[in-house]
Image (tube, rainbow, N blue to C red):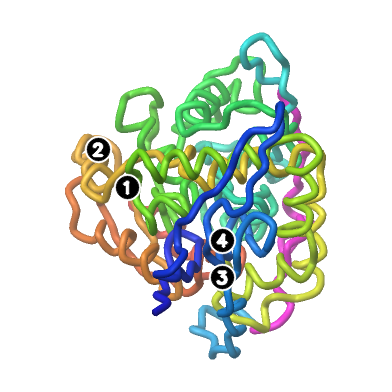
Amino acid sequence: MATAASCCGVNAVSSSAASTAVRGKSVGSQINCASVISIPVTSFGLALASTAAVDLGSSGLPPLPRGKKSLGYGVQKRGVRIDAAVSSTKEASKVQPKQWTWTHKGSPIKINAVEFVTPGSTPTQTILMLPTISDVSTTEEWDAVAEKLLSKSNASYQIVCVDWPGLGLSDRPAIDYTADLYEQFLVDFVSANDGPLGSLAGPLVIVGGGHAATIAARAVSKGLLDAAAVALVAPTWAGPLPIVFGRDDTMETRYGLLRNTLNSPGVGWAMYKYMVSSPKNIRLQYLTHVYAEADNVTPSVVEKRTALTQREGARFAPSAFLTGLLDPTRSREEFVGLFANLEGKVPTLVMSSTKSPKRSKAEMEALEGAKGITKFVRVPGALLPQEEYPDAVSEELVAFLQSLH
């Protein structure tokens, strides 16, 4: 009997007969994998549908969700805007592209960032926005929220949004992507004298989505980053496969086999293109768990996000995310516990999204009333509420930021 689960950006269906069978052997430097993990998987970060590596079985892909009614906040069902200028403040604010070079183990990695500024103003606070980690991760998901913050608040902000190494428009080298690597990158980015945040306009507020939010909160909790406040939007901590199948030695071996196959030259890229890098697969991701409203999954959204998955090196960071290497914690207890160190020190806002996958939502909801959480609210959306419902997210951010003064 098949069982279904939704978690942290993954909808997985496992068969009791062959849910985790792995038959692989090395052939030179290549991996011959008859079946890596025999489950149909559609993940926010990877959509697996290859019979060569992952047996879909007879269940096939899940049915596409029907359209749902809007939850308000003045957001229209159709025409979600994902370009840089998305509000009536187009003439009052500008987006300035930035580029910074991060050095990792002696190798330069070009990092893409954007800065939102209001001409003629003197910013009194700096906001760093971190995109949700996935194969479609991009600074653009925060564009509308940034614009609305500049227009709705009486305060003047310096807003910077940065693409993670291996994602968005940043370089995507074949390196070992881990949560520790991303934590170190974040610390280096914030502290770099020659970076976009080299001269802070004021106290730093960090805003992030998904795994990015939790990685940032972990760094602040450990004292690696000095933040005046932290805001987490639809925060997650567990990769798609580990939260469903666990982390025992056998499963970790299987995750490694899948990851190595995806990262291998030739077959890995072909496998990724077949399973992920197509408009059909990207649209399915958005319909099943990235967006809450089917009508918001427009051709423009699908086209732009598909292009991200076709960049050179596009598969390396997502394969790490899928198999748990980017997980900032290993359990719910650890996830909830990391905020205890922020109690009375760093104001912390959590936005739980109402239509997230079941397991993702359960982890978000576990933060309600937790020690160190200053304010807990619910906003419409699934795993990208900041892009799909920017009005709701920006309203909560404005209220939170005003409460800091």
Q: Earlier in the sequence, mark 1 or mark 3?
A: 1
Q: Amino acid at mark 3?
A: Tyr
Secondary structure category for the residue under label 2: helix
Q: Nearer the viewer, residue 357 or 174?
A: 174
Horizontally, residue 289 falls left or right of residue 317, namely left
Q: Which disc, if any, is residue 260?
A: none
In the picture of the structure, the residue carrying the numbered disc 1 is 348
Mark 2 lies on residue: 342
Quadrant of the rendered image containing residue 361: bottom left
Q: Which residue is mark 3?
A: 389
Q: How much space separates mark 2 and mark 4, taking CA atoms?
A: 31 Å
Is residue 81 one of those drawn in magenta?
yes
Any magenta on residue 48? no
* Disc 1, SS: strand
How far apart marks 3 and 4 lie (CA) works out to: 21 Å
Separation of residues labelled 1 and 2 (CA atoms): 8 Å
Mark-to-mark CA distance, 1 and 3: 21 Å
Please tell me whether mark 2 or mark 4 is closer to you in this view.
4
Mostly what secondary structure, the magenta segment?
loop
Q: Find out whether the residues at labels 1 and 2 contact each other: C-beta distance under 8 Å.
A: yes
Of badges 4 and 1, the one in the foreground is 4
Disc 1 marks a residue whose amino acid type is Thr
Relative vertical location of residue 158 with respect to residue 9 in this rendering, above or below: above
Q: Residue at x 71, y 59 (%)?
A: 275
**Where does the magenta region start and end?**
77-100
